Amino acid sequence: MAGRGGVVRDNNTAKKYWDGVVPPECRPDPSILRLATTLQWEPARDPLHADIDTTKVCGVGPAMPFANALVRRGVAGELGLVPCAVGGPAIREWARGEKLYENMVKRAKESLKLDNNCEIKALLWFQGESDTDTEAKAAAYKLNMETLIHNVRQDLHFPSLPIIQVALASGSEYMEKVREAQKAIDLPNVICVDAKGLQLQKDNLHLTTEAQVQLGHIMAEAYLTHFHA
């Protein structure tokens, strides 16, 4: 979810950087805001996670095309994104009590305090490549994800929180085992969309900018189909 679309490596220095290309589907819109690390709303723009996933280079992700698609369909007058993603951690690092999980819950709760009219509408979840490198991690994925869903719903006092999960497009030896676990989760208001087949960058790990846009649209359609009355 942090977004690596357009992140490339400099051939001379081997350092990574974002190419700065923002597709039309990702352009800022006055009605789309993001919760900054200062816990204040500000205009949303890519790289959406630049101040969240600070140890890596962030680029285009699926969140801005997701939000723009919903705005174009008239879903909300104003839409707030609460970026919490950090690239690389395994699902166990998102367990209750761990820093990533607690920061996610804190940011979600703080977003509601800024405006009495705010309400959480969905959680977007795209993670798991780091769980594909060992059979043990892959085997534990389903239970760990189901536990996360239970915990975040409990901690946000939102037992029916809609969740849109993405089945992986890439990974290591046990990718298919993790994908099977993701697609096998059968809980109310949990939808799984599939990223497999979307174009990957040369690293065969991260989605291209175009693929990030496609995924954002897929997630938006899933939200509109299953969760928008």
Image: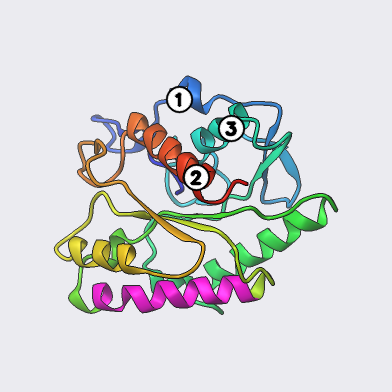
Q: Is residue 20 left or right of residue 112?
A: left
Residue at image point 41% right, 71% down: 145
How far separated are the C-alphas under marks 3 and 2? 26 Å
Q: Secondary structure at mark 1?
A: loop
Q: Which tag, 3 or 1, sits closer to the chain's start?
A: 1
The reply to whether the magenta stretch includes residue 152 is yes
How far separated are the C-alphas under marks 3 and 1? 11 Å
Q: Where residue 195 appears, x then y in whole percent?
A: 30, 46
Q: Is residue 130 left or right of residue 226?
A: left
In which quarter of the view is residue 210 placed? top left
Alpha-carbon neighbours of circle 3 within 10 Å: few (<14), some, or many (≥20)? some
Q: Are marks 2 and 1 in contact (CB under 8 Å)?
A: no
Q: Which tag, 3 or 2, sits closer to the chain's start?
A: 3
Q: Is residue 12 left or right of residue 105?
A: left
Front position among marks 3 and 1:
3
Res 1 visible? yes
Residue at image point 20% right, 61% down: 175
Q: Which residues are magenta?
A: 137-154
Mark identifier at residue 225? 2
The residue wearing badge 3 is 45
Q: How many marks?
A: 3
Q: Secondary structure at mark 2?
A: helix
Q: In the figure, 27 relative to 104: above or below?
A: above
Q: Which SS type dominates the magenta stretch?
A: helix
Front position among marks 2 and 1:
2
Q: Of the residues shown, which amino acid type is indicated by label 2?
A: Thr
Q: Where residue 171 appears, x then y in whole percent?
A: 22, 56
Res 61 visible? no
Q: Of the residues shown, which amino acid type is indicated by label 1?
A: Gly
The residue wearing badge 1 is 20
